[in-house]
Amino acid sequence: MTHLFDPPTPNLPEPPKPHDGVLDNTPETSIAPDLTADSKSVLRNPNFLSLWTGQVFSQIADKIFLVLVIAIVSTQFQHEGETISGWVSAVMVSFTIPAILFGSIAGVYVDRWNKKTVLVSSNILRGLLVLSIPLLLWVTKNSVLPWGAPTGFWGLLCITFLVSTFTQFFTPAEQSAITLVVEKPKLLSANSLYTTTIMGALILGFALGEPLLALSDHLWHNVGQEVLVGGSYLVAGIILILLKTGETKEDLHRDSFHLWNDIKDGLQYLKQKKTSLSALIQLICTFSIIAALTVLAVRLAEVMPEIKSEQFGFLLAVASLGMAIGAGIVAKLGDRCSRQMLSLIGSLGMSAFLGMLAIFSDRFGLGLIAIAGTGIFAGLCVIPMQTVIQEETPEDMRGKVFGLQNNAVNIALSLPLSVAGIAESYFGLQKVIFALSAIAIATGILAWYIARQLVES
């Protein structure tokens, strides 16, 4: 009987061999990764390097885009003495709705489309949309719709909606492309590098987004901000032209296309594959905790005397830095124990540091340590569970499963944005953070228990 904490043994005599950096469509295997070597060798894969570099620019653009839109709202549409909350809420709704509506649908289509085409076109289209903002504002200047709303603002909401919509197609295509260009033994290392990049982009967006936009506006007056964000999308698209996924027309699943049936196929697969389902549940809960902390960060900054409430982005940057450190730990030590054990350690660590944050929520130094610790152990949860889903999902189901995952995670990120603030006002900051701590440990134990039961059965 295989013990849960033992690394998985291979089902084939040798691992699949790549051709020109692209992984063959060989049967799924389960091989323990040698991450010490993989951390370096994965960057020697030209196709992964292209995918990763394109992601760097795309992620930077993603994280600064909302900062750009809010900056435009504050300078173009907000009236003096008026609160910006209503304007920002409208922007956030237009950005969130596509994630809920199209997350699963996009994954079904991605299964039938060439992944490189989706990656390149989604970045190019987002870049062109952002670059069109100055023209939109010029054309609609002083124009008002019949119900009194500025025409330019509604146009900006439409652009935000479309940018977010194209992002829903980019995400499952990106996840599928990783599995096409990276050998399975190196997936954990590749995901660690990806997560580090995402966290770096978060830090850049929260901590440096506004100064970068101000600098670009100084260099190219009136269009500099859009050039920075839109240009980053375009650079990402150009870099991804170099990507070779090795897909052929025969690899694309164009037969018997029934949208709802394909979504049900993805749900049925997750129902049957308990380890992937438990991994997805843990991803959803972990991202829900992160989203709740995003809202609570404003209140934390308010109760910490050393900083102001509007400086809450600094706290989020610390959490993002912690997740980047966690990704590095997984890349370095991830071959020492199973994916489920890493995730359980991450859940226990998150729970402990969230408890510490609840106790020392008004202490700046100890609060920062708790936030960073929460981020580190969140990385230990997210990366192994994402890798489990990638390793177990067959090629013909990846778009469906990753689309469902994208949809579920986006909902998980959206709901706490409204619930956490209300809960904090009713129950207080400490009780809400303690509740998040309890959710973290309960989810980790549940995912570990499910995996252990499957191994022992």
Image: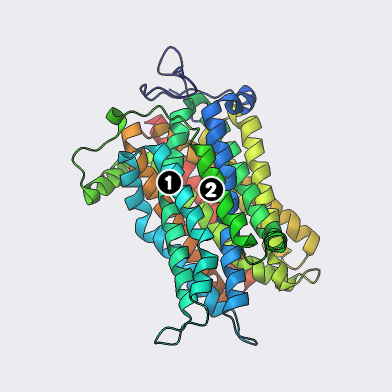
Q: Please name whichever residue, 251 or 355, is drawn nearer the observer in this view of the structure.
A: 251
Residue 219's x, y, as percent?
71, 59
Residue at 60% from the left image edge and 37% from the top image edge: 193
Residue 329's x, y, as percent?
66, 36
Question: Is 208 located above or below residue 311 in the figure?
Answer: above
Query: In the drawing, does residue 327 fall left or right of residue 390?
Result: right
Q: Which residue is mark 2?
A: 234
CA neighbours of label 1 inside 10 A, class few (<14), some (14 to 19), many (20+): many
Looking at the image, tell me whether mark 2 or mark 1 is earlier in sequence order: 1
In the drawing, what numbered circle is on residue 121?
1
Real-space Cα separation, disc 2 to disc 1, in angstroms: 10 Å
CA neighbours of label 2 inside 10 A, class few (<14), some (14 to 19), many (20+): many
The structure's colour scheme is rainbow
For mark 1, give the secondary structure.
helix
Cβ atoms under marks 2 and 1 closer than 8 Å: no
Farthest residue toward the top?
A: 13
